[in-house]
Amino acid sequence: MPKLIVFIILNLILLNISNISSANENGSNFSCKWENKNETACIEIIGLVPNSSNFTKSGINKITITKKQILESGAVDLIDVLKSVPDINITQSGPKGQQASMFMRGTGSNHTLVMINGIPINDQSTTQGLHDFGVDFIQTIQQIEIYPGSTATNFGTNAIGGAVNIVLTGDYKDSISVATDYMGNYEFSGSKTYIYDESSLNVKIGSVKNETISARGNINDEEDSLNNYSTNINYEKFLSENTRIYSTTYLRKTIAEYDNSNTNQYGYEGDNKMGAIQLGLENQINSKKDNYIFYYNIYDREYDELGTIDTYESEVLGLKYDLSRILNKKLSYGIGSEFKYDWGYFDNNGSYEASTKGHSDNFALYGNLGWNIFENSNISLFSRRDDHKQTGANSTHKINFEKMFNNFNLGISYMNGIRNPTLYEMFGTDNYGYSGNRNLKPEKSNTYEMYSDIFLNEYVNLSLRAFKANIKNNIEYIDNKYQNDLDNIDLNQSGLTNQINIKLKNTSLNFFTSSLSSKKENGASQLRRPDKNYGLNLTKNFKNSIFGHLKFNIKYNHYGKHFDTHSTSFSTIEMDSTDLVDFKISKKFNNGNFYIKLNNALNETYQRPHGFNQEKRTIKFGFKY
């Protein structure tokens, strides 16, 4: 409670600071202005990055995947979108709906922060604090943003490897879409917007049914089913040309069968429910922006294992305020604060019994300064201080320098990050003697990075990015207890990613390669992190003499050789590489779009991780109106 009081007082102070006059405050910064006309309103999606201002944005590594790109790819779930992004490796324990983990830049699966509209949504009832990407589907998602590398100064703790931001906003294009295959599986989505004098209400719904293969055992055994339902409601009202109130509500329910072992394949089902509510007030004109957000997240998960019920619940309540200012043509700054209260509980029954119940809170202050020190040269400084109930006060920082030349830019960054221990690591117990350790310290990281974007001509550009990072104070399970590793030997990661983008009149091509080295303390390679990945995404418009204008899309991804744990002997084994190809061809007519998609066209048979089958070749037919 004292932290909440401090939060309110500081925001009153920050509000007073924000009212100090600055240059060029007249006029609007919106390219879309609200006009009460009987026509579709324009929509502009601006990714909200906390702790950023005008001259610091160039120092933030951000990959944006738009709604158009998501639709062109034919993606069904979040994994379909992320698996072709450099710096990201994903494993999933079976077909769609099964638990999935992401390793960004070679870090652990609990080192990626996941957000909705810039608000963290990592489930506090998980033992390791990781996000399950297997239960998120894209039917109501408007945009996806990926931030490779430590982004602790922007988004807070747990973003050691990076962050993924799911953007949910109103979609002013009413639509209905359905896809199916010969096995009766389907994907459905719909969007409807109601526009009033100075406000709008958008409702989006989605549903997915998938039943293709068995997660474990013989790939032709019983098929593990998935049923997903999602709803997204967005409302906004303009109080004036520059001031609006807004809200986002997201509800998701994913029911998936899973297999406990090769011999126990029936009677296992997970029911994963999640909800998020965000209420905001935003004011923006040319030289300044203020944003207040109240948010509430809730998870309710149940796993039925032959009548034994495991229950996981968590809640997060938070308040946040961001301001950014342009002082003049050379300087910009931002200031913000956030108070967050986490509560979590789970009860795991059966042969392995574990439970936890606890809470924590965190109060953060952060700020940034952007300086256009020379012509086409920016220095960006970021700082954040998190005061956690259990681990105390910890600070993170970032400095970035970028120089623009005629046809390319060159940048260099240093950043650090932290991951606070989870509620289970601090308060949990199990029937093998583990008892929570409240004296744990946060894991900490350091990252050094160089990058360049080279514009060869108006059609071709090349992106290069190299990094080297380390993680210390690693939290490990030793002698029935989670402890910080104190041997002064760090986990080390380094890598190089390249992207070539070619955009012609009727063709766009993206080709990427990724080289990664992720090492344990003994120098051995980390599991499930291949050294080499590469792939491409090609979209081509062409005209056929019979069918007329068509759009063709091909996605190819090479997932390199890597080490994994054998699912029964638990020994370390080497896994072979995989080459996955997806095709999609679509035909647009009037207000409709018909398409055919071929997934896993080469019918690659593989397991990732070992012991868990992945889906075979499938053909889908879809229509959007």
Image: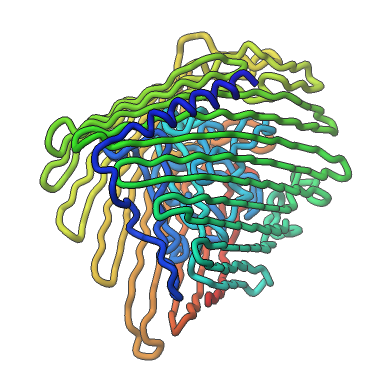
User: Could you tell me residue 241's position as x and y percent?
Assistant: 40, 55
Residue 398 or 565: which is nearer the viewer? Answer: 398
Is 566 situated left or right of 489 in this image? right
**Rendered position, 136 above or below 37:** above
Task: Please report the residue visible at 56 percent of the width from the left and 44 percent of the height from the top.
Answer: 91
**Rendered position, 356 above or below 264:** above
**Most extreme residue toward the top, as rendered?**
487
Q: Quadrant of residue 219?
A: bottom right
Residue 16 or 617: which is nearer the viewer? Answer: 16
User: Could you tell me residue 594's position as x and y percent?
Assistant: 50, 78
Task: Please report the residue visible at 53 percent of the width from the left and 71 percent of the height from the top.
Answer: 174
Is 399 situated left or right of 253 in this image? left
Q: How many marks?
A: 0
Is 282 situated left or right of 318 in this image? left
Q: Quadrant of residue 66?
A: bottom left
Task: Please report the residue visible at 47 percent of the width from the left and 57 percent of the height from the top.
Answer: 580
